[in-house]
Image (cartoon, grey):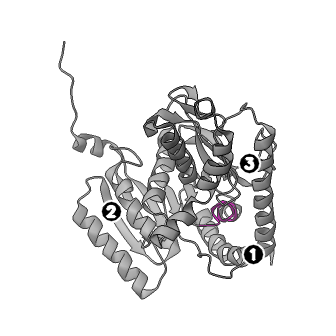
Amino acid sequence: ARPSVHLSPAFHEMSKAPITICVTGAAGQIGYALLPHLCSGKTFGPDQPIKLHLFDLPIDGVQTALNGVKLELEDATYPLLKGCVCTGDEKVAFTGVDAVIMLGAFPRKDGMERKDLLEKNCSIFKVQGDLLNTVASPNVKVLVVGNPANTNCLIAAECAPNIPKKNFSALTRLDHNRCIAQVAIKCGVPIEKVTGSIIWGNHSSTQYPDINHCKVDGTAAKELIKDDAWVNEVMIPCVQKRGAAIIAARKLSSALSAAQAISDHMNNWFLGTPAGTFVSMAVDSTGNKYGVADGLMYSFPVTCKGGEWTIVEGLSIDDFSKGKMKATETELSEEKTMAFEILKA
């Protein structure tokens, strides 16, 4: 038999053109945790060179910190990183980009109502959507992470009519991964044995973590667990409130796990989901078969192939699930109404 030929990483590197990735809010702790994923090939593939456009607020201290990150990227000598631009100018950040990971958003402060938070974020995501519409690659893929992520994503998509709605998504993969972790811990199995968790709806405490279609090494998870009280009273609230638990413990929001989830989300979106598996992404609900109102950014189970996501159809939904899915839909519809009123004002 002829020996197999192993091409050097340098050969693969030369064979693909770089893609340009913009990260907003890049000076923050999630950005710091995310960049190694992007630059090492973990996110977009081990043979995919990238260029980075790192954006953060045009404030001296923030830009100084951002440039400090650039110095570290230089020192990390990533072979796949072919260039890095740091900027406080959104137009520079978005020009010609193939993907945008929007970490930046106005954070909720003590005493703020949801409407106050939406007002602050509407202005941010309207500007960014308008700019994406004019200067980004026409097939740019946009992932919104900054909260309220689903509705921020909807605003950006609404303000970028030249970019297909299917090219916008919001992150619920962290919740999805949290759900898988809880099932794996409960069943005492390795993480990779658990598939088929679903996050329905909003990335908020109304989200519905659903394990009715979850499998552990091919067996239905609920058959193994045999404990509906644990599912409904322990696992679901745990996933819904995990972010708050991490803030209480670390005095900082999730960064390490958020970065992993962003990397997972973009990897599946660009390179596909493994055969026979699905993941959770918040995407345009229009035309879905689960009775969710059209025109929302709602988290569904999806498969990805060729850079496109498809909502998984035909999953059975029990009455308990229908109630949970409706509650999170109601919250998203309320957020949409508020946001669109602010945009029209």
**CA–CA distance between discs 2 and 3?**
36 Å
| Vertical placement of residue 142 versus 185, above or below | below
Q: Residue furthest top?
A: 1
Local secondary structure at mark 2: strand
Amino acid type at circle 1 is Lys
Q: Quadrant of residue 338?
A: bottom right
Q: Which residue is mark 2?
A: 83
Q: Which residues make up the magenta segment? A: 147-155
Local secondary structure at mark 1: helix
Does residue 8 appear in the picture of this structure?
Answer: yes
Binning the other alpha carbons within 10 Å of mark 3 as few (below 14), some (14 to 19) or many (20 upward) gives: many
Q: Which residue is mark 1?
A: 115
| Residue at figure coordinates x 38%, y 61% from the top left | 35
Dominant secondary-structure state across the stretch colored magenta: helix
Q: Earlier in the sequence, mark 2 or mark 1?
A: 2
Q: Earlier in the sequence, mark 1 or mark 3?
A: 1
Residue 7 horizontal/vertical position (percent):
22, 34
Q: Do residues under tags 2 and 1 come within 8 Å of each other at their CB atoms?
A: no
Q: Which residue is mark 3?
A: 285
Q: Which mark is residue 331?
A: none
**CA–CA distance between discs 1 and 3?**
23 Å
| Residue at figure coordinates x 45%, y 63% from the top left | 255
Local secondary structure at mark 3: loop
Residue 139 horizontal/vertical position (percent):
56, 51
